[in-house]
Image (tube, rainbow, N blue to C red):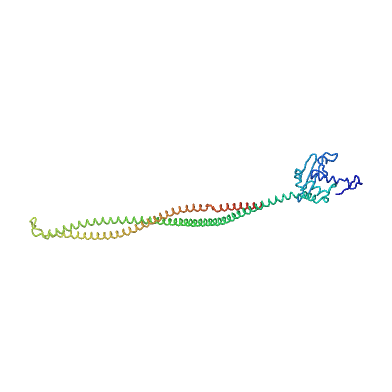
Amino acid sequence: MTGINHDNPRLDGNGCGKSSLLDAVSWCLEGKTTRGLRSNDIIARGYNTCFVIVEVDVGNEILKIKATQNPNSLTCNGHTVDRETLTKQLRLNFQSFLYSVIIPQAGNSFLDLSPGEKLTLFSQIMDLDLWLEKSELALEKSNEIKDSIDVCERNIAQLNGHLTALVSTMEDLLVKSKEFDQKKAEKVEHLTIELNKIIADIEGFKTEIIVFDLAIKELGPKIRCAEDAVKRQDQHIKDLEFELTEADKELSVANHKITIIKESLKQLEGVGAICSVCKQPVDERHLIKETKKLESGLKTLQGLKTVLLDAKKEININKSEIITLISKLDTEFMQLRTKETKTKNSKNAIENEIVYLEREYKRLEIEIRKTKEQKNEFNQMITEKRDEVSEVNKKIDGIKSI
């Protein structure tokens, strides 16, 4: 360091303030000047305070150090520090500072020192004892770190094993989840098909009921007509039976009269000249007259008998025809009744089937709704496993970042 003394040029570079500048740096960094001055001794005459600011590079760090006297303070980068802390940050004590930074104006320089003194000074400057201690501490720390690394690697291996197991479990759960969703969809589809079939069956049965109602409605008049026809023919049979009874009565009367007349004629044929009852002579003309009268009555009765027999025969024929017709009408009536009964029974059966199908429809609707609402528990399990995988990865990342 050189300078010019402008106050007294004859002194050349002496007295220009070089030592004062170095003393200021020494006092700021080490708390005393190169000549050992401290405290108020460093304040120039005429002043009651002073301060020094020095910026130094220590490694990659820039330190801005400010020292003041009256009031006393020491800061580094704006933070208050003590001398011991500052010495550690500077990595130089006072002696090291003097021999490494400032070449003394008085005393022995570093090159003038003995080898032992040089080694001692060099150890002090480099703080080799500290580094030896730090080296041992570093070795211990290195071993601790290696042990920690081994523990971390084992933990990571365990966590990776757990992670592999979780991934395998998740893959199995995904397969089961897909199978669950597929079976659920297939069940809903199957139930929907059944439901649509029931709807179609109900509509078909309702159509059949309409057909049956029409058939029953059409059978009503036919059955009533057949029933009326049978009643009319039954009444006709009764009328013919009545006529037949009357004819039998008239025929019986006619037969009785014919018998009487025949007996009377037989008696007249046996009458002689003298009446056997009254013993009087018989009038032949009167006898002939009575005989003719009886014969005429007999002929009339026989004609009536023939008419009655013919009428009875005709009545029987009509009765037989009507009985055949009634039998036919009865058969037709019974057929209509049977058809009506079967139609009603079929309608009732279909109505019962519709009631059953409507219950099945409601049951299937409920089952479909429950199936759709059924939760896939595998998804929740997969989510839990994913969260667990995330936690394991965080633990692994945390271990790796140590």
Which residue occupies the foreground of this view, 104 or 287? 104
Q: Report which quarter residue 328 is drawn in.
A: bottom left
Residue 267 left/right relative to 17: left
Q: Is residue 334 left or right of residue 204?
A: left
Splitting the image into 4 quarters, where does residue 231 fall? bottom left
Q: Spot the residue most to the right.
A: 10
Find residue 155 and report its horizontal and vertical position in percent. 62, 53
Q: Could you tell me residue 6's position as x and y percent?
A: 90, 46
The mark total stands at 0
Residue situated in front as seen by the camera: 171 or 128:
128
In the image, taking residue 318 as reference, residue 180 lies left or right, namely: right
Identify the image quadrant of residue 232. bottom left
Residue 249 at x, y = what percent?
22, 56
349 relative to 97 in the view: left or right: left
Q: Nearer the viewer, residue 197 or 83?
A: 83
* Depth check, front residue: 225 or 17: 17
Position of residue 325 measured from the top left corner of the image (x, y, whole percent):
31, 59
Is 268 rendered above or below residue 32?
A: below
